[in-house]
Amino acid sequence: MEQPPPPPYRKIADAVRRRIATGELTPGDRVPSTRRITQEWGVAMATATKVLTTLRQEGLVRVVPGVGTVVAEPQRTARSGGPARERRPRETDSGLSRESVVRAGIKVADAEGLRALSMRRVAAEFGVSSMALYRHVGGKDELVLLMADAAFLDVELPEPAPDGWRARMEAGARLQWELYRRHPWLAQYLSITRPQPMPRAMALVEWTMARVRGTDPVTLIHMALTLLGFVLSTAAGFEDDLEAEQETGMDQAQWMATMEPAFEGILTSGSYPMYAGVSAIGEDVVNQDSLFEFGLARLLDGMGTLVGSGAAGDGAGDGGDSSDGGDTGDAG
């Protein structure tokens, strides 16, 4: 008698299991989400959920909060044949600890961009195999999240803090801008639509908005996220420029010099008077910093219409320059 075919969830689980067994998916890699499974195999959400539950019960995958379901590190067995006792990470293990791995990840991403970051690349900084890192972080996704939150340790809040709402928001925006300049990958990693749990970053935003008065909570959070989105989108060019320089071997000024003949031909056509007017000045009047400064000022001009007249220091106020502050620790 012919046996009935296996249920759909088991066939899908077998397929994912094969990807893990063949090394297509390695420890720390994200496995297909329930939504991806429904799209790829055309099954219901309940079936997709059962797939991941089955793999989790088998110990092949695990859930990382804020990241998703990832391939679990293979369980080792003791010589007696029973499960090995979990080993606590120690700093003395080849110089590895969660903190040192995060620091190494930041170093790699700062120099080479986030696309160049991998567990293998970070492991090379210590001269160990990538598997050694999994005792300290669950995989690349978790590592990048830890790196992003740790980067905000660089933030030094000015003391005394600006008291006026505009000066405080301006100072907060500048602190973020300089942070993204030091860590070019960070702005592109952070997301407003899919935020990650990052207490230090959230603390900086809270500090930035602490002097805004006369608005309701919904308006206040919209102001905060609008300011954050502006700084993020403007700073996203930092990593683009870093990667372009690595690919071409030319910095931004050198690249623009090679493009000058092509642009000159366009501008002398007479069809682009706005661009030609700027080009005639002969100075670098449009760059990332000028875009940031102009956009920030206009954004705060507009937000001034939303702030109640009772706010302390309605004007620009004093102390907006974060460089005047001392070391008060991190933003968290």
Image: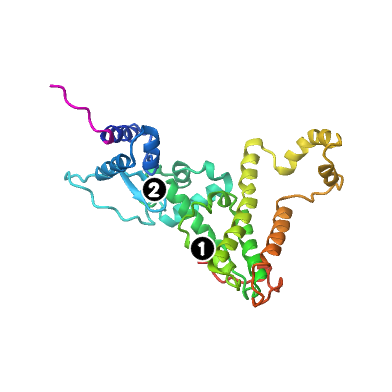
Q: Position of residue 155 (x, y in %)?
A: 57, 64
Label 1 crowd bin: few (<14), some (14–19), many (20+), radius 10 Å:
some
Name which residue type carries label 1: Met
Label 2 crowd bin: few (<14), some (14–19), many (20+), radius 10 Å:
some
Answer with left or right where residue 210 lies relative to residue 78: right
Q: Position of residue 213 (x, y in %)?
A: 60, 73
Please tell me which residue is depicted at 29% across the width and 53% down the height of the picture: 87
* Quarter location, residue 20: top left
Q: Secondary structure at mark 2?
A: strand
Which dot marks residue 68? 2
Q: Which residue is mark 1?
A: 202
Q: Which label's residue is closer to the chain start, 2 or 1?
A: 2
Please tell me which residue is depicted at 51% across the width and 55% down the height of the picture: 148
Indicate whether 97 appears above or below 50. Answer: below
Q: Is residue 259 visible?
A: yes
Q: Position of residue 97 (x, y in %)?
A: 40, 55
* Quarter location, residue 246: top right
Which dot marks residue 8? none
- The residue segment tinted magenta is 1-9
Q: Main secondary structure of the magenta part?
A: loop
Q: Is residue 330 visible?
A: no
Name which residue type carries label 2: Gly
Answer with left or right where residue 165 lies relative to residue 218: right
